[in-house]
Amino acid sequence: MPLESNRPAARPRSAPTPTQGSGSARSTGPRPTSGALRPERDMSRPLPAALSWTVLLAFAVAFAVAVVVLGIPLWLPAVYAVASVITFAAYGADKSAARRGAHRVSEQTLLTLGVLGGWPGALVAQQVFRHKTRKRSFRRAFWTSVVANVVVLIALIVVLEWAGWDVGVVRDGFVSLFE
């Protein structure tokens, strides 16, 4: 059995030998490429799926507790639910387009949908479709957007709690800052 560590890092790939297998997901040997080598891509090993499911579960539990304890109006979780369904569909459409080689949904659109409250649906879609889980730059931007969304959500809840969930009080207070 050849030692993989003895190979040069930039070795050109060729058709698999009988000992390497066909390049399927279960194969440990190099996968064949069609045509010229692709330029270096921003890919890495996906994060463990358990991390995504744990973050999603923690968010859902925290949101449910906030609804019960703080009396958050149900429109707020409804916004997240609707945005998540839309984002899930967008990820599905992008994965389908990627397989067909058709026009793709832009990463900016996927990230924007996540920032607008659809990130829970994005997490589910990433795991269900196994899509957008390896590209480092997208993962960094995605997790940054998740943290930003949660911070803004917490700030919104604090402000609305202070105002007694009267959006008019918050609006009037905000407007008075600029008068």
Image (cartoon, grey):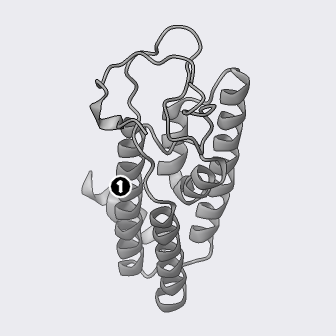
Tell me which amino acid carries mark 1: Ala
Q: Nearer the viewer, residue 63 or 35?
A: 35
84 in relation to 129, above or below? below
Could you tell me residue 170's position as x and y percent? 40, 67
Q: Can you say which quadrant of the picture contains the N terminus?
A: top left
89 in relation to 83, above or below? above
For image coordinates 47% across by 50% down, the residue present is 115
Could you tell me residue 91's position as x and y percent? 63, 42
Q: Is mark 1 on a helix, strand or loop?
A: helix
Q: Name the residue under label 1.
A: 148
For image coordinates 41% across by 34% down, the residue present is 43
82 in relation to 23, above or below? below
Instruction: Decide if residue 53 is on the left or right side of residue 104.
Output: left
Q: Residue furthest bottom?
A: 69
Q: Nearer the viewer, residue 173 or 20?
A: 20
Could you tell me residue 88's position as x and y percent? 66, 50
Instruction: Decide if residue 2 is on the left or right side of residue 30.
Output: left
